[in-house]
Image (cartoon, helix red, strand yellow):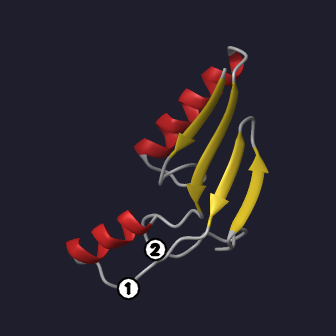
């Protein structure tokens, strides 16, 4: 079976959603499924893209699963409205 997982958080980000997502994907691959993850450039919690990654339109990597990272819109505002708008844009 082919699985596409859409998520905001994925390793190397260190938080519960990223860890859980990766573990789910790893188990699915072990069971013979083809797993792809669509996520953004790692930037949580500071909002700055991690070293070694770039905020570009599209970049791919394979770490047991096929990870596709997309460009994200980041804003300086931390208001709930601004964060909600960025979430909807993504």
Screen quadrant of the N terminus: top right
Disc number at residue 32? none
Apparent side of residue 49 relative to residue 63 in the rendered image (left or right): left
- Relative to 61, 89 lies left or right: left
Residue 60 rendering spot, x and y as whole percentages = 76, 55
Judge left or right: residue 44 versus residue 30.
Answer: left
Rendered position, 76 above or below 35: below
29 or 5: nearer the viewer: 5
Where does the image place residue 39, in percent across and percent down from the top left?
57, 54
Cα distance in 3D space between marks 1 and 2: 8 Å
Q: Residue at x 28, y 67 (%)?
A: 84
Q: Is residue 22 above or below residue 43?
A: above
User: Within 10 Å of the Cα at label 2, are there few (<14), some (14-19), or many (20+) other Cα atoms?
Assistant: few
User: Which residue was labeled with disc 2?
Assistant: 47
Q: Residue furthest bottom?
A: 76
For label 2, the SS is loop
Rendering quarter of residue 69:
bottom right
Residue 59, how many percent across, how many down?
Answer: 74, 62
Proximity of marks 1 and 2: CB atoms separated by less than 8 Å: yes
| Vertical placement of residue 76 versus 25, above or below | below
Observer-nearest of 5 and 42 = 5
- The residue that appears at 53% across and 55% down in the rendered structure is 13
Q: Is residue 84 above or below residue 23?
A: below
Label 1 environment density (alpha carbons within 10 Å; few <14, some 14–19, many ≥20) = few
Comparing 28 with 51, the one in front is 28
Sequence-earlier tag: 1 or 2: 2
Q: Position of residue 41 (x, y in %)?
A: 60, 64
- Determine the residue located farthest toward the top in the rendered image: 31
**SS at mark 1 in the image:** loop
The residue identified by callout 1 is 76
């Amino acid at each position: 079976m082919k699985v596409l997982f859409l998520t905001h958080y994925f390793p190397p980000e260190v938080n519960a959603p990223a860890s859980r997502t990766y573990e789910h994907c790893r188990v699915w691959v072990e069971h013979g499924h083809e797993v792809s993850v669509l996520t953004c450039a790692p930037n949580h919690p500071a909002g700055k893209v991690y070293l070694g990654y770039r905020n570009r339109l599209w970049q791919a990597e394979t770490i047991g699963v096929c990870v596709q990272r997309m460009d994200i819109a980041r804003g300086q505002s931390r208001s709930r409205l601004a964060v909600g708008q960025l979430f909807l844009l993504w």
